[in-house]
Amino acid sequence: MKGLFTALMVSYDEEGNINEKGLREIIRYNIDVNRVDGLYVNGSTGENFMISTEEKKEIFRITKDEVKDRVKLIAQVGSVNLKEAIELAKYATDLGYDALSAVTPFYYKFDFEEIKHYYNSIINAVNNKMIIYSIPFLTGVNMSVTQFEELFENEKIIGVKFTAGDFYLLERMRRAFPDKLIYAGFDEMLLSAAVLGVDGAIGSTFNVNGERARQIFELAQQGKIAEAREIQHVTNDLITDVLDNGLYQTLKEILKEKGVDAGYCRQPMKKLSDEKIGIAKSIARKYW
Ligand code: NGF
């Protein structure tokens, strides 16, 4: 389960329906061109928090059907509706997903006992493994090393997707949990996280920039930091341009430039203006 996982984009049509053909094209592009080790399905990048339970299941089903066993699959099943999370965990496990992940429960200010109950309830309901999805800047949930340790007491909880810029905490986690899987979540900080010894990374921009991400990660592992830094610089020029223009919409436009039917984002995310579509096309020309 180590390596680079694309946080999979989903193609939606103009009315917001799942575009199965487009989704399959995105999956194939990630396997054949980006050559990632796996896919992280129904994360933030899949626009998961704006879609229904049935749609989440459909995306899990289509993805597994397209991938078969060619790359590893992680199913993000987290939800503030714990019953939904358990239902999705069972569904993805039955489909044969290699691991589950769940975002820390958000919106309400859940205390740690509630968070622990949430993770144990999901993972103890299935015969599978759990990767905690920690993304404090969106959820407001900040956990300490001691709290992670308490969660990791459940042996089925095998790792964490660490989407934060706190490198002191990341170093402390690496030191404390040498046998747990730690995935870097911010693509713009991949090199720094790789230097600290993460086991892999999960990223939205890998949908288009998987090749550079692999170079950064592997060069860092070989200790070739100066070379890796040059590629991270180019990657971050790209990421800065993408973030300025609208993250997921721009990644989809770049995929379209590469011949992939990546569709539109789900409302309430807005469509790009014609001007911004033009900028996205120029980003695609600039970096490839
Ligand atoms: O998009 C977000 C959240 N984070 C992703 C990544 O952690 C994947 C990251 O790649 C993810 O969270 C998910 O799909 O569940 C960023 O998009 C990237 O570093 C640009 O900031 O906002």
Image (cartoon, rainbow, N blue to C red):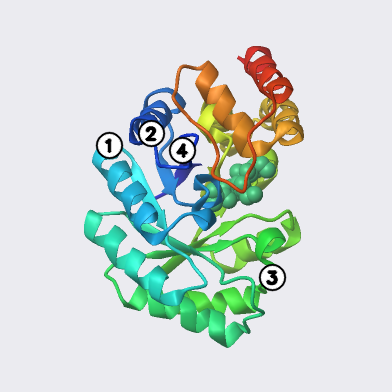
- Say if mark 4 contacts mark 3, CB within 8 Å: no
Residue carrying label 3: 142
Dot 2 alpha-carbon crowd within 10 angstroms: few under 14, some 14 to 19, many 20 or more: many
Q: How far apart are the alpha carbons under marks 1 and 2?
A: 7 Å
Q: Disc 3 residue type?
A: Asn
Left or right, 25 with respect to 149, comes to: left
Dot 4 alpha-carbon crowd within 10 angstroms: few under 14, some 14 to 19, many 20 or more: many
| Mark 3 or mark 1, earlier in chain | 1
- Say if mark 1 contacts mark 2, CB within 8 Å: yes
Identify the element where label 3 is drawn.
loop
Residue 220 screen position, x and y as percent: 61, 36
Q: How far apart are the alpha carbons under marks 2 and 4?
A: 14 Å
| Mark 4 or mark 3, earlier in chain | 4
| Mark 2 or mark 4, earlier in chain | 4
Residue at horizontal 66 percent and vertical 73 percent from the top = 143
Identify the element where label 4 is drawn.
loop
Q: Disc 4 residue type?
A: Tyr
